[in-house]
Image (cartoon, rainbow, N blue to C red):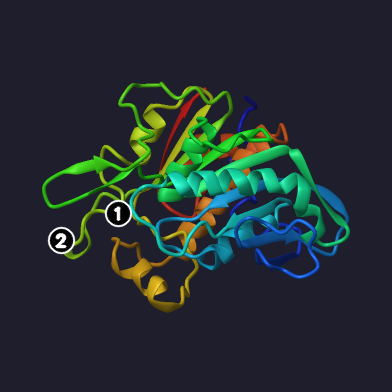
Amino acid sequence: MAASTATTDVFLSGKYKTVLISVDTSSSGLVNPPPKPLLIGSPAEVAGEFPVMVLLHGYMMETSFYSQLIQHVSSHGYIMVAPQLYTCAASDSTDDINAAAATTNWLSQGLAAVLPSQVSANLAKLVLAGHSRGGKGAFALALGKSSTPLALSFSALLGIDPVDGTASCCCKFQTKPPVLTKVAQSFDLNMPVMVVGSGLGEDKKYKVFPACAPKGLNHAAFFEECRSPAWHFVAKDYGHMDMLDDDTKGIRGVVSYCMCENGSSREPMRRFVGGAAVAFLRAYLGGDDRDLMALQDTPDIAPVQITVEARL
């Protein structure tokens, strides 16, 4: 890895103007509509070929709640594809994982038709990411737990406060299909991984609701099972939902504020998650690790207080 310059622009908006594109499963005029509704973030007003990230949403969340995060990453030269995997779901995430696989397979057939005309997708640099339950789903898909065979390969994996289960007043349990094995470095992923955790995710809201990211089922456990190269960032004073948009509408939006312990505001955590993702992608897709090393060597350049652990 290169020596750090201890400076980075990843926490600021990038040089590309962006556009958000909503694509429905019944969108008229599409020969190959997607298997699930999509929210796509893309660079706009410039010709180019850009890597693609598939982003899986958290439990009962809407893809629109990730709009600001999607735009931050897209502004640095990435196409973001966020499928709405479900609107209502039980604890078993098997269907989510299969839907994510189907969406991934659709990219080579249908993505080009919905992007700005001058923009093309580089599917040889395809990244899989997910938040919360979507983080579990991302790991499960990367580990081959989908019954839908993948037609494309992933180049990197990003877990945003992934959770492999839930907690009650007296116990914790994994939800189906279980991903964590409780065996260190057991994940055979063959790709670089970054796990971002929230320091407040283990705390109960009002001491009443279960923790949104219970200890033993959260980011720390996922990182423990990753082989090198793997990175682990934890934002000390921020919560499980703090990377979402400031204004999350509707009942689900209210829930995103009420069920989990939160930091003082979402903007710093959102900038951190987006910026860390860009630094990670620049390193492992673009071959430029200066931003990632700057974060490791001088973590106080981040907009939030973080701890950093790397297995290289």
Where does residue 60 sit, x and y in percent of width and height? 41, 62
Q: Quadrant of the N terminus?
A: top right
- Dot 2 amino acid type: Lys
Where does residue 111 sit, x and y in percent of width and height? 75, 53
Q: What secondary structure is marked by label 1?
A: loop
Residue at (73% x, 36% y) in the render: 286
Nearer to us in this view, 49 or 84: 84
Instruction: Please indicate, yes or no, whether residue 115 appears anywhere in the rendered image.
Output: no
- Dot 1 amino acid type: Cys
Residue at (52% x, 36% y) in the render: 147
In this figure, what is the number of numbered marks? 2
Answer left or right for 158 relative to 21: left
Residue at (57% x, 38% y) in the render: 148
Instruction: Please indicate, yes or no, whether residue 40 appears anywhere in the rendered image.
Output: yes
Answer left or right for 288 relative to 144: right
Instruction: Please tell me the numbered disc located at residue 202.
Output: none
Instruction: Please tell me the numbered disc located at residue 212.
Output: 1
Where does residue 300 sit, x and y in percent of width and height? 47, 46
* Foreground label between 1 and 2: 1
In which image quadrant can residue 5 be found?
Answer: top right
**Which residue is denoted by mark 2 in the rendering?**
207
In which image quadrant can residue 45 be found?
Answer: bottom right
Nearer to us in this view, 92 or 258: 92
